[in-house]
Image (cartoon, rainbow, N blue to C red):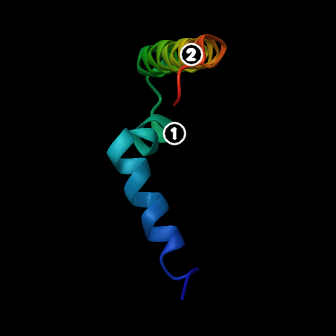
Amino acid sequence: MKGKYKYPLRMQLYNIFGINRLIHSRNKQEKQCFAIVASFVLVAIAILVIYTTKFSNSMVEAGSPI
């Protein structure tokens, strides 16, 4: 039953995020734009993780209950 929904779910996610269009596109500019946006998103996520970790560590050092 679990495998029955795996493929349609993957295809739906590809269509939502535009990955399917990107895979089958021949437009080089569209692929570069997607790569730039994806890199900015990854950097933003990394900054968020680092900030959260630093904030949590400073709260623990200060003795604040979490």
Query: Which is more toward the observer, 46 or 65?
Result: 65
Pointer 1: residues within 10 angstroms few (<14), some, or many (20+)? few
Q: Are marks 1 and 2 in contact (CB under 8 Å)?
A: no
Q: Residue at x 54, y 19 (%)?
A: 52
Question: Along the horizontal axis of the image, is 7 left or right of 33?
Answer: right
Disc 1/disc 2 C-alpha distance (Å): 44 Å
Q: Residue at x 60, y 11 (%)?
A: 62
Residue 42, picture quadrant: top right
- Residue 20, how many percent across, how many down? 44, 45
Which label belongs to residue 2? none
Residue 29, picture quadrant: top left
Query: Which is more toward the observer, 17 or 64?
Result: 64
Element at badge 2? helix
Query: Which is more toward the observer, 31 or 36?
Result: 36
Figure check: 6 above or below 59: below
Q: Residue at x 60, y 18 (%)?
A: 63
Which label belongs to residue 59? 2
Q: Which quadrant, please, contains the N terminus? A: bottom right
Q: Residue at x 45, y 21 (%)?
A: 34
- Residue 60, how many percent across, how many down? 63, 19
Q: Nearer the viewer, mark 1 or mark 2?
A: 2
Q: Would you name the residue on which mark 1 appears?
A: 23
Pointer 2: residues within 10 angstroms few (<14), some, or many (20+)? few
- Residue 17, how many percent across, how many down? 38, 40
- Residue 21, how many percent across, how many down? 40, 40
Question: Along the horizontal axis of the image, is 55 left or right of 57?
Answer: left
Numbered disc total: 2
Query: Which is more toward the observer, 27 or 19?
Result: 19
Question: In the rendered structure, which amino acid carries the disc numbered 2?
Answer: Met
Figure check: 49 above or below 1: above
Question: In the rendered structure, which amino acid carries the disc numbered 1?
Answer: Ile
